[in-house]
Amino acid sequence: MPFGEYVPFRKQAGSIFNRLARDIPRDMIAGDEPGAMTIADTRIGDTICYDIAYDSVIRRAMDGGAQLLVVQTSNAAFTGTSQPEQQWDISRLRAIETGRWVVVPSTNGISGAVDPSGHVVERAPMHQPATISTTVTLAASRTPALVIGRYLEWLLVIVGVGAWWVGTRRRNQNQGDEQ
């Protein structure tokens, strides 16, 4: 996330903007392990805020055996914007896509729990200390989205590139016919 967890061209930008060293003292880098960890006997798909928007991150957690998803977040930089609601809605879609419960603990945004159908089971008020408690069901099955999702993505890319190529050829042929 540029300027959130990572500053591109840090050395050059730091010589212009002195605040970088103070406000974002170090860069976070992506791990190379799937975001799945075992706590007790439960395999948890662990993500942080913006990770929830990336198919590959969620897919790796599911491939790693995640039985539920947790989306840790701090929305402080986005107070007063639509970002917390957008992130919450993406989390709800991930619940449907994966067939897993999604639990969102937030320090200052939206905290809550979503069942595998996308139904909001618990939701705490924003910017207020709160405790929520709910019972979740663990899952191990693979939804159709998890089984065919990556192949469908590639198919759509191929169709899109093919359509662009056909359109370009037709335009070039039409321009050649006009001359």
Image: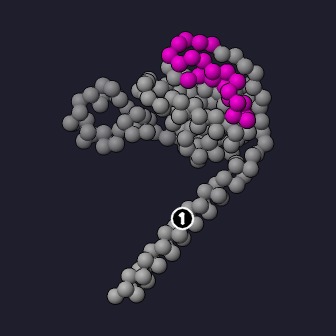
Q: Secondary structure at mark 1?
A: helix
Tell me residue 111's x, y (percent). Answer: 59, 22
Residue 134 image position (x, y, % from top left): 72, 19
Q: Is residue 83 above or below residue 63?
A: above
Which residue: 64% across, 39% down?
93
The number of numbered badges drawn on the structure is 1
Mark 1 — residue? 160
Apparent side of residue 47 relative to residue 175 in the rendered image (left or right): right
Give the image location of residue 131, x and y in percent: 63, 13
Residue beneath the point at 70% across and 30% down: 119
State the residue lying farthest toward the left: 16
Residue 117 magenta-drawn?
yes
Which quadrant of the view contains residue 5? top left
Question: Would you say residue 55 is visible in this rendering?
Answer: yes
Q: Where does the magenta region start and end?
A: 110-131
Q: Residues within 10 Å of mark 1 (few under 14, many from 20)?
A: few
